[in-house]
Amino acid sequence: MKKFFEFDQLGTNYRTEFLAGLTTFLSMAYILFVNPNTLAAEGTGMDRDAVFAATALAAAIATLIMALYAKYPIALAPGMGLNAFFAYSVVLGEGIPWETALSAVLVSGLIFVVLSLSGIREKIINAIPPTLKLAVGAGIGLFIAFIGFQNAGIIVGYDATLVALGDFTHGPTLLAIFGLIVTVILITLKIHGGIFYGMVITSIVGIIFGLIDMPTAIVSGAPDLSPTFGQAFMNLGDLFNWQMVTIVLTFLFVDFFDTAGTLVAVAEKAGLMKDNKLPRAGKALMADSSATVIGATLGTSTTTAYVESATGVSVGGRSGFTSLITAGFFLLALFFSPLLNVVTEAVTAPALIIVGIMMASTLKEIDWDVFEIAVPAFFTVIMMPLAYSIADGIAIGFIFYPITMVATGKAKKVSPIMWFLFVVFILYFVFLA
């Protein structure tokens, strides 16, 4: 085992790798409860217990592939942002059945696999302007945070102004505010797993004050996966229209760019980059792309690499053995589904807000002084929460980029891929109307 994971070359050992794997798991464990609550939100029709099982299994299997195939200390799980896009934009916003939405995730994963097997992936990454990549990440952050504020009751609908502050005397809202404050303090103190610990503390306080029912059990058998398993293959024929093409592209783009950024960020922190290049990058991308296919098959939205893996790296994780340990904990988590009833929207809302804050940090890297760059970036960021759709935000930003480039005499900087997307997104809005 030590030889397989190259412990001696990487200067690590079993104890360090185990602690790193545990740290990574605790930093990511919130997704076990946030993902089912998001995908099985009222109106989507998804089975929450089945989504919990799919989340745990997808994370375990995908992380295991990363451990044994790519040998990186990087864990994977259903991604934040794309799960919100799946539930609130695609299923609830556009009225698309969740089964069809899973088919879109599956196809995006299969395309990602093809791109990972070819050299096309680098061309696509280079074709999208860095500013728009940054804007997409920040916009998703604002979108997630907005959903968190809504779920908490901090922001509510109001006819005169569309939105307004909620009732801060309402018990669940007060509980969510308490959870947000606690989580902010934990993260500020740089406590690994701060989001997860914040959810635990908030749940306990909610039970003490009678806002959350005491769980009837803590451990049970693994939930039934049959309500979601294999559904992604049943509606592939429904994807042949402009609306679904755009949705597939959105799943693909966000996963593609998020993965590339996460892999580089974690590898740099671990000191694994060589000559500014990521060794075994193809294997890492293949592990990530296959994770999306596996997750969709099981019954969850896009499964992708988690930047929280950097917490495990920070305590010494350097090899795939770290990921092996994390995968083991996700498998163990399968038997704790009764705790789903304790983790209410008031408990998960702070996690959404905190993740939103973290994702919005990319705003600082956008060159706001260059107007032709600032315009498409701004529209990408602002339209995601305002239109309540990640796809609409991406579409509007990608439409305005060629326009501002042509207007400033920089048409040659617009790649053929961006012109192709320009046409696709215009047709998307035409047919959507």
Image (cartoon, rainbow, N blue to C red):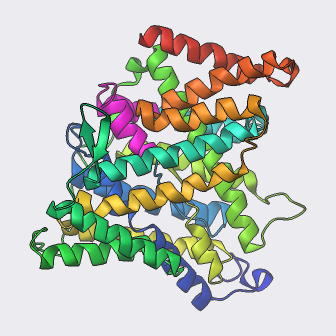
Q: Tell me if 226 is positioned left or right of 234 in this view.
A: left
What residue is rendered at 85% in x and 25% in y? 413
Quadrant location of the N terminus in the rendered image: bottom right
What range is drawn magenta here?
82-104
Residue 45: x and y in percent read 21, 38
Closer to us: 329 or 342: 342
Q: Is residue 1 above or below residue 144?
A: below
Quadrant location of the C terminus in the rendered image: top left
What residue is rendered at 37% in x and 56% in y? 55
Prevalent SS, magenta region: helix
Residue reaching furthest to the front: 160
Q: Tell me if 89 is positioned left or right of 395 in this view.
A: left
What residue is rendered at 25% in x and 61% in y? 346
Q: Quadrant of residue 236?
A: top left
Residue 374: x and y in percent read 70, 35
Closer to us: 390 or 102: 390
What residue is rendered at 56% in x and 54% in y? 359
Residue 100: x and y in percent read 35, 28
Residue 100: in magenta span = yes
Q: Quadrant of residue 98?
A: top left
Q: Tell me if 47 is positioned left or right of 319 in this view.
A: left
